[in-house]
Each structure stands twice: as structure tokens, then as C-alpha cells.
Image: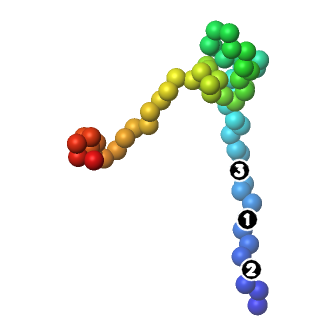
Amino acid sequence: MSDTVRGAAIKGVTRPSKRFAKDRVCAQPGCETKLSQYNKAEYCHAHAPIRFPRVRGKIMDEAEA
């Protein structure tokens, strides 16, 4: 008896990746970085605005830490 497990291939229609305009450049003045057609952002990584993740749980004061 064989102890091999076999799976089946995924069947069905897969959705294609969303695309944006080709040959886009970073929106920062003077930046010539070319953006991917799969990147929905307006800015390159170096000029993207800082985004802070949502913090869950209790936020401690500096005095408590």
C-alpha cells in the first residue's frame, strides 16, 4: 500500500490581475521612476506617503511602559 497523498488541480475560471495604465511615472515632481502596470499607487516606494497600520488593543502611555 502506498502512503502517498495526491491532490486535484484547481479547476474553474481565474480572474486576471487588475492592470493600470502603462508607462506611468511617479507623481512626485522631478522623479522619473516608472511604475508597474499592476501597481495602483500614484507614487513610487521612495515618495509614497507614510501610512501607519491600525493599532489594536490598549495604547499605553509612556509612563506605563
Front-lying residue, 17 or 57: 57
Position in image of residue 27 (x %, y %): 63, 13
In this view, the residue farthest toward the left is 63
Position in image of residue 44 (x %, y %): 64, 23
Q: Nearer the viewer, mark 2 or mark 3?
A: 2
- Residue under numbered circle 2: 4
User: 35 left or right of 65?
Assistant: right
Q: Amino acid at mark 1?
A: Ala
Write the residue at 27% across / 47% down. Answer: 65
Vertical arrangement, residue 57 with respect to residue 16, above or below: below
SS of the residue at dot 1?
Answer: loop
Write the residue at 62% across / 25% down. Answer: 46
Residue 13, quarter of picture: top right
- Residue under numbered circle 3: 12
Image mark for residue 8:
1
Q: CA distance from mark 2 to mark 3?
A: 26 Å
